[in-house]
Amino acid sequence: MLKLYGFPLSNYYNKVKLVLLEKGIPFEEVHAPVGPGSDPEAHADKSPLGKVPYIETEQGFLCESQVIVDYIEARWPSPALIPVDPWQAAKVRELITYCDLHVELCARQLYAQAFFGGTLSEKFVARVKKDLARNLVAFRELATFAPYAAGETFTMADCAVYTSLPLAALASKLVCGEDLVAAAGIDWKSYVKLVEQRPTAQKVAADRKADQLKRMG
């Protein structure tokens, strides 16, 4: 059975988990924490940079969330989370790239202060705020939210957007004093409510909340 390593509070872990749940693929979750208090070398033989998530297959280990979900899509093509049409497939992957690289990784620079008790300089926050605001406007140009991120049907893009966009909104509100996602014209709360009508997303959200409460308590 395929094994998914990581932890339910990780958005990239949940991106992969949501794909697996949507496809109905049996898998085992293996808790593999990273960060303060964990051994930085604990995962190096499975994920060279020691990052999660990664998966274990009968052929070996595979890391990087987008590589993992592309592998899953190729190996278990039904139900499809990528359109058959080459152009539409490319547009879904374009949206995922913007979400992961230009929205989430930009907003991630704020996480130290937003979620982990750190302090960032005003100059640093101002730079990130400017970059994130610009990137979110660009992202909004690509995303349709009609009603899903890439159009009428749920796709792999939603597995990325649903798990990452709320973090960008919360981090920017906590650190910058403004929800930059909403300011870019993205009604992300309604979008999250839509996605969470799906039992798979409900499962991801419940496990994430349970993990968060466990860490707090």
Image: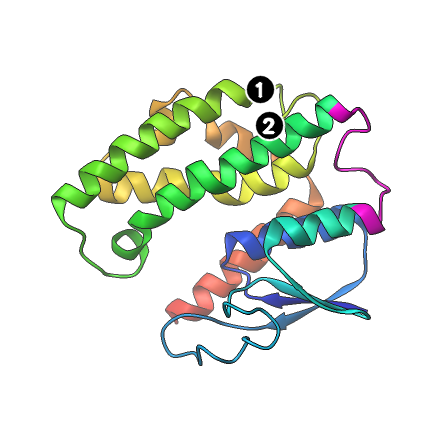
Q: Are marks 1 and 2 in contact (CB under 8 Å)?
A: yes
Is 154 left, or right, of 188 in this rendering?
right
Q: Is residue 167 above or below residue 113?
A: above
Horizontal and vertical percent for residue 62?
A: 67, 63
In the rendered structure, which amino acid carries the disc numbered 2?
Ala
Most foreground residue, 59 or 11: 59
Residue at which label 2 appears? 149
Horizontal and vertical percent for residue 43?
A: 55, 75
Q: Which residues are magenta?
A: 74-86
Figure quadrant of the C terminus: bottom left
Is 87 left, or right, of 112 in this rendering?
right
Q: Is residue 36 above or below residue 15?
A: below
Q: CA distance from mark 1 to mark 2?
A: 6 Å
Residue 18 seen in the figure: yes
Is 25 magenta? The answer is: no
Check disc 1 and report its element: helix, strand or loop. Answer: loop
Most foreground residue, 68 or 204: 68
Q: Residues within 10 Å of mark 2 (few under 14, many from 20)?
A: many
Residue shown at the point (58%, 22%) measured from the top left: 145
Residue shown at the point (36%, 74%) measured from the top left: 36
Check disc 2 and report its element: helix, strand or loop. Answer: loop
Q: Label for residue 158?
A: none
Horizontal and vertical percent for residue 155?
A: 70, 34
Residue at which label 1 appears? 144
Horizontal and vertical percent for residue 67?
A: 66, 51
Residue 153 seen in the figure: no
Most foreground residue, 81 or 199: 81
